[in-house]
Image: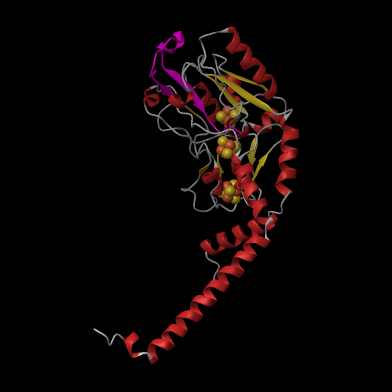
Amino acid sequence: MEVTRRLFFKLTGTLAATSLIPGSKTVWAAEAAEGSKNAYGCLVDTTLCVGCRKCEQACNERHVLPKPRESFEEMTVLENERRMDETTYTVINKYYPKNIGSLTWRNRPTFVKFQCMHCMDPSCVSACIVGALTKQPNGAVTYDAKKCIGCRYCMVACPFQVPAYEYDNPLTPQVRKCTFCFQDIKDGGLPACAQTCPKEAITFGKRADLLSLAAWKMKSHPGKYVDHLYGEHEIGGTSWLYLASEPFESIGFPKLGTTAPPRLTEAIQHGMFQNFAAPIGLYVVLGGIMWVTGFLKNNHGKKAQNDPVDKGDSP
Ligand code: SF4
Ligand code: SF4
Ligand code: SF4
């Protein structure tokens, strides 16, 4: 039998669903939470960013990515909102103030650096049926191309639409996204973008310390920041955290709840497995209904054949 790509995904999806034993992901979540105590993160203070694109360039060079069409000195690219893709792990976008309001810092554009948020409980990791994505104890969400089967579930699952796929690479396509410079931080270094930023708009450190730093900044500069640290609670928290003087919805951030999507989906899976009897019972009832319906139809058909009134003979 020819195993088509669609059938392969169907089979692997089914296998994955059946292998999701209740509790297995819970153990993983507990391990992740344990690791997250010492995990690193980055605090981006968007009020300090001047949109120089040096972080974009540093990332491009660090990861030996293809050179962009427009040079990193070209600032007109900031006039259009951009997204990360398979050749660009991070972008700076420029947002003009929509409402100056009472905040003094809202009289200039806000520049925002986007990349993978390295979620605390990542949807991409949960969605990946072959374990090609891993939440590392140091906070990075890493990718193993050797395990990847190219299903692209991670792209659908990511609430920030970050993972990009190398569609132009027919032989060895990979999923691409910010690596959090995993090897560098593992070796005691900094992410290239944080190291390069001339305005120190990106602070790298333990996530727990960054939360304290952000709280201190907000308290020490009343009126400078909106009262919201993006990433502290969104979808269970992210390793990258943001301070801003504009509401986050107006500077390109999606409005998200506080529950990590994997907690919701896994709760549903657990419910299905725990109440496995219920679906079986339902199938029995449905089967019964279908049998009775078929029986009545047959009976009605036989009766109709013998009954001239039912043959439509009456006016
Ligand atoms: S932002 Fe998207 S790709 Fe990055 S860790 Fe979160 S879910 Fe995964
Ligand atoms: S495409 Fe994404 S979800 Fe699919 S195997 Fe690769 S990393 Fe995992
Ligand atoms: S952490 Fe590393 S991979 Fe991610 S945007 Fe910064 S330089 Fe690029």
Q: Position of residue 296 (x, y in %)?
A: 48, 80
Visible in this render: residue 62?
no
304 left or right of 167 in image:
left
Q: Nearer the viewer, residue 230 or 289?
A: 289
Q: Nearer the viewer, residue 298 or 29?
A: 298
Position of residue 281 relative to residue 169, above or below, is below
Q: How many marks?
A: 0
Which coloring applies here? secondary structure
Q: Quadrant of ligand 1?
A: top right
Q: Quadrant of the N terminus?
A: bottom right
Q: Position of residue 14 (x, y in %)?
A: 61, 60
Query: In percent of the image, x 55 and y 67: which residue is there?
Result: 3
201 left or right of 252 in image:
right
Q: Position of residue 137 (x, y in %)?
A: 72, 34
Q: Splitting the image into 4 quarters, where does residue 142 fall?
A: top right
Q: For residue 53: magenta?
A: no
Query: In percent of the image, x 42 and y 31: which residue is there?
Result: 82
Q: Residue furthest bottom?
A: 306
Q: Nearer the viewer, residue 27 or 315?
A: 315
Position of residue 191 relative to residue 29, above or below, is above
Q: For residue 102: magenta?
A: yes
Q: Quadrant of the C terminus?
A: bottom left
Q: Position of residue 303 (x, y in %)?
A: 42, 88
Q: Splitting the image into 4 quarters, where does residue 230 fall?
A: top right
310 left or right of 112 in image:
left
Visible in this render: residue 192?
yes
Query: In percent of the image, x 67 and y 17: which residue is there?
Result: 212
What is the magenta range?
Answer: 93-119
